[in-house]
C-alpha cells in the first residue's frame, strides 16, 4: 500500500520538459489545488455537516493508503450536449415545445444559432425549471429561464468544447476538440505566461498550412481593466492576470481566412461555466452518498440527491457510476477520482465513417489519420497497478492497445498533408461522411466519441447507510463561494462577455477555484470574498480563517488567530455564475483587508462567515493558501 506524494498533472503532461524546476513548481501548485477541491468534496457542497463523516465515502489519496490491487474504473459519456436534444430537438422524451430538426441542432451546437439572421430570437429558447421526476413542459412559462449555460460557447456543457475552421466555400477544414480544464491553465499561467503563449501558438498551428497559422502574444492572453484597457496585475505573481476568454479561446468559430492579422477564435480549454474540474470532484464526492431509492436510474438518482445538472450526458452518468462503485458488489468501497485527475477525450468510433471515392488516398490511409492527438496520450500506464488504464479502445495495429482508455486533452480533426499532396483540387472534411452524411458540422464528429474520467474505489469495512432523498437543496447560511484578489475580481466582474443568448454574463463567471496564495507577513492584502448570505439585507459579518488540517477537513474547526480579516464596508450584491454552476445567481461580495503574521503556519486554510449573534458554521476548506515569504 502507498499514498500519493503529490497529484500529477492531467495525462501526466509535462509542459516543461527542459526545466525540471518549473515543472516541479507547477506540480506543487497543482497538488495544492487538487487537495483543496477534494477536501471540498469530502465536506460536501454546500460546505457543511449535512452528512456525517462516515456517510461521505470520498477520500483524499494524499492521506489514504491505496493497495496495488485497486484498479481504476473508467466512466464515459458522449461528447455531444444531450440537453440540446432534450430541450430543443424533435423526438425528445418527454416532447419539448420546439422540435428543432437535427440540422438545426447541429448548427446551434456549432454556432449558437439555428437559422439566419443570427439574432437572439434565432438562438436559445426558454426551458422549464421543473426537472424532477422529469422535465415538466406543462408548468407556467413565466417560471422558465432561458436555455443556458450562457457564454461564447457555454452550451457545450459535456466537458468537451470545440472550435470550427472553415474555408471560403464554407467547408470545414479543421475542428479543435478540447477537454482541458480551465484550472490547469490558470495554474500554468501563474508559473509562466510565456509557456502558456508558446503552447497556445504551437497547438493552434498544429499541422496547419502556413497561410492559416496564428501568432499569439502574451498581450492577447492577459486580463485587461475594462475601463483603462491596461493589464490587471495579479498581486500573487506581480504579472498580468489571465483572461480565460481571450481572443484565441473564445467561441466555437476559428477565423483562418483573409488577412492573418484579423485571425481570431480557437479552443484551448473549457469555458462553459459548469465545465470545471472542481465541479467534477464535488459531484463525485456528493455521489458517494447512498440513497434508499437505489441507483438503477440515473435521472431518479440525480433528482433524489440533487447534485449536478439534469439531462447532461455527464452528470447523471458520473453520479450513478460513482454511487455504484461505492455500493460495490458485496463489499462497499470508498472512492475518489484516480490520479492523474482530469477529463479525457476518447478516440472516435470510425465504423460509420467513409470518404468520397473522388479523393486520392496514400497507401494504407484511413479516416483515423484525420484524428490527430495534439495534447495528452493515446494511453497511460496506471502507476498503482502497473497496467494500462482500462477502457473501450482497441487499436487495430498495436496489440498492446486492446481495451485501454485514452488520455487525450486536445485533438484536431483535419485532413493530413499527405492527402492534400495527392489532391491538388483540394480536399476538406466535407469529403468525409458520417452515417452517410457529409460532414457539415463538428457535432457529427462529437457524436462518435466519448469523454471519460477514472474513479478508484478502495474496499472498506464501513457500510454506507442508505439515506432518504434530499427534500430541498442543502443550504448553509453565509456559505463562502469564492476568494480572489480584489483588483482581479473587479476586472473580471466588470467585463461583460458577448454571447448568442444576449444575456449579461460577467467574465467572473469564467473564473475558477484555483487557490489564492498570500505570503507570510503580508499586511493590508485586498481580497474579495463572494458568499451566499443568510438574509437579503446582510449585516457586516465576522470573517475567520482556519488552521491547517488537510488530512481531516471535516474536523478543521480551529480559528487561526494569526490571520485577521477586516471587512471593508457593507456586503455588496453581485450576480454571476459561480464557477461550476450553469446559471447566474444572486450573491454578495465582501471586500476584505487581510493581515498575515510572519510566523503563520504554511498551508491551506478554510474560511467561515458569521453574522452577529449567529452560531459559527463549519469552515469552507481550501480557499486560501499561506506560502513562504522567502
Image (cartoon, grey):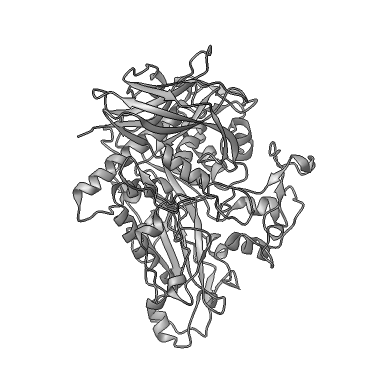
Q: Is the residue 81 above or below the residue 488 in the image?
A: below
Residue 585 position (above or below residue 266): above
At 47% from the left and 54% from the top, the residue drawn is 245
Image location of residue 478, percent across then percent down? 53, 24
Q: Is residue 328 visible?
A: no
Q: Is residue 97 left or right of residue 585?
A: right
Q: Quadrant of residue 36?
A: top left
Residue 571 coordinates in the image, percent (x, y)? 53, 28
Image quarter (top left, top right, bottom left or bottom right) of the N terminus: top left
Identity of the residue drawn at 68% across and 61% down: 119
Residue toward you, 119 or 311: 119
- Most extreme residue toward the front, as rendered? 228
> Which of 476 and 174 lies nearest the eye of the viewer?
476
- Residue 417 seen: yes
On the image, the x and y values in percent for residue 406 come to 40, 54
Q: Is residue 544 above or below residue 294?
A: above
The x, y position of residue 133, in whole percent, is 70, 36
Q: Quadrant of residue 345?
A: bottom left
Amino acid at each position: 500500500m502507498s499514498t500519493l506524494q503529490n497529484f500529477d498533472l492531467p495525462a501526466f503532461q509535462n509542459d516543461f520538459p527542459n526545466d525540471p524546476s518549473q515543472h516541479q513548481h507547477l506540480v506543487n501548485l497543482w497538488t495544492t489545488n487538487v487537495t483543496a477541491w477534494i477536501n471540498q468534496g469530502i465536506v460536501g457542497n454546500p460546505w457543511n455537516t449535512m452528512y456525517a463523516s462516515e456517510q461521505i465515502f470520498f477520500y483524499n489519496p494524499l492521506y489514504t493508503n491505496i493497495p496495488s490491487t485497486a484498479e481504476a474504473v473508467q466512466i464515459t459519456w458522449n461528447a455531444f450536449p444531450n440537453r440540446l436534444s432534450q430541450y430543443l430537438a424533435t423526438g425528445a422524451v418527454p416532447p419539448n415545445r420546439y422540435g428543432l430538426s437535427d440540422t438545426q441542432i447541429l448548427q446551434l451546437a456549432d454556432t449558437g444559432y439555428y437559422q439566419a439572421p443570427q439574432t437572439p430570437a434565432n438562438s436559445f429558447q426558454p426551458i422549464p425549471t421543473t426537472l424532477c421526476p422529469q422535465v415538466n413542459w406543462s408548468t407556467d412559462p413565466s417560471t422558465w429561464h432561458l436555455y443556458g449555460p450562457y457564454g461564447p460557447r457555454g452550451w457545450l456543457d459535456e466537458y468537451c468544447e470545440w472550435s470550427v475552421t472553415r474555408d471560403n466555400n464554407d467547408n470545414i477544414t479543421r475542428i479543435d476538440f478540447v477537454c482541458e480544464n480551465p484550472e490547469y491553465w490558470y495554474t500554468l499561467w501563474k508559473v509562466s505566461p510565456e509557456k502558456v503563449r508558446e503552447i497556445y501558438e504551437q497547438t493552434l498551428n498544429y499541422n496547419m498550412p502556413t497561410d492559416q497559422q496564428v501568432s499569439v502574444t502574451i498581450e492577447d492572453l492577459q486580463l485587461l481593466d475594462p475601463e483603462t484597457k491596461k493589464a490587471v496585475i495579479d498581486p500573487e505573481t506581480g504579472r498580468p492576470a489571465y483572461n480565460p476568454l481571450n481572443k484565441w479561446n473564445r467561441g466555437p468559430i476559428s477565423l483562418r481566412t483573409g488577412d492573418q492579422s484579423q485571425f481570431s477564435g480557437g479552443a484551448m480549454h473549457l469555458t462553459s461555466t459548469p465545465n470545471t474540474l472542481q465541479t467534477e470532484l464535488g459531484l463525485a464526492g456528493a455521489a458517494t452518498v447512498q440513497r434508499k431509492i437505489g441507483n438503477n436510474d440515473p435521472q431518479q438518482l440525480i433528482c433524489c440527491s440533487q447534485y449536478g445538472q439534469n439531462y447532461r450526458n455527464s452528470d447523471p452518468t458520473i453520479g450513478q457510476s460513482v454511487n455504484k462503485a461505492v455500493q460495490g458488489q458485496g463489499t462497499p468501497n470508498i472512492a475518489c477520482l484516480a490520479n492523474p485527475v482530469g477529463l479525457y477525450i476518447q478516440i472516435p468510433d470510425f465504423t460509420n465513417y467513409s470518404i468520397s471515392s473522388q479523393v486520392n488516398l496514400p497507401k494504407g490511409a484511413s479516416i483515423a489519420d484525420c484524428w490527430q492527438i495534439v495534447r495528452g496520450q493515446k494511453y497511460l500506464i496506471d502507476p498503482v497497478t502497473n497496467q494500462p488504464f482500462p477502457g473501450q479502445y482497441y487499436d487495430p495495429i498495436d496489440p498492446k492497445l486492446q481495451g485501454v482508455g485514452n488520455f487525450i486533452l486536445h485533438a484536431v480533426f483535419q485532413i493530413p498533408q499527405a492527402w492534400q499532396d495527392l489532391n491538388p483540387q483540394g480536399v476538406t472534411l466535407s469529403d468525409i461522411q458520417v452515417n452517410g452524411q457529409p460532414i457539415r458540422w463538428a457535432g457529427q464528429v462529437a457524436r462518435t466519441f466519448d469523454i471519460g474520467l477514472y474513479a478508484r474505489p478502495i474496499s472498506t469495512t464501513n457500510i454506507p447507510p442508505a439515506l432518504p432523498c434530499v427534500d430541498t437543496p442543502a443550504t448553509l447560511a453565509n456559505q463562502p463561494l469564492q476568494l480572489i484578489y480584489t483588483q482581479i475580481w473587479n476586472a473580471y466582474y466588470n467585463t461583460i462577455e458577448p454571447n448568442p443568448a444576449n444575456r449579461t454574463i460577467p467574465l467572473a463567471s469564467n473564473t475558477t477555484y484555483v487557490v489564492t496564495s498570500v505570503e507570510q507577513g503580508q499586511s493590508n492584502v485586498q481580497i474579495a470574498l463572494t458568499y451566499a448570505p443568510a438574509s437579503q439585507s446582510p449585516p457586516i459579518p465576522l470573517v475567520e480563517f482556519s488552521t491547517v488540517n488537510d488530512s481531516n477537513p471535516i474536523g478543521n474547526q480551529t480559528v487561526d488567530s494569526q490571520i485577521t480579516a477586516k471587512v471593508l464596508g457593507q456586503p455588496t450584491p453581485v450576480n454571476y455564475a459561480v464557477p461550476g454552476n450553469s446559471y447566474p445567481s444572486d450573491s454578495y461580495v465582501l471586500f476584505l483587508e487581510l493581515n498575515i503574521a510572519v510566523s503563520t503556519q504554511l498551508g491551506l486554510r478554510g474560511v467561515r462567515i458569521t453574522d452577529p449573534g449567529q452560531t459559527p458554521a463549519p469552515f469552507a476548506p481550501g480557499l486560501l493558501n499561506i506560502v513562504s515569504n522567502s
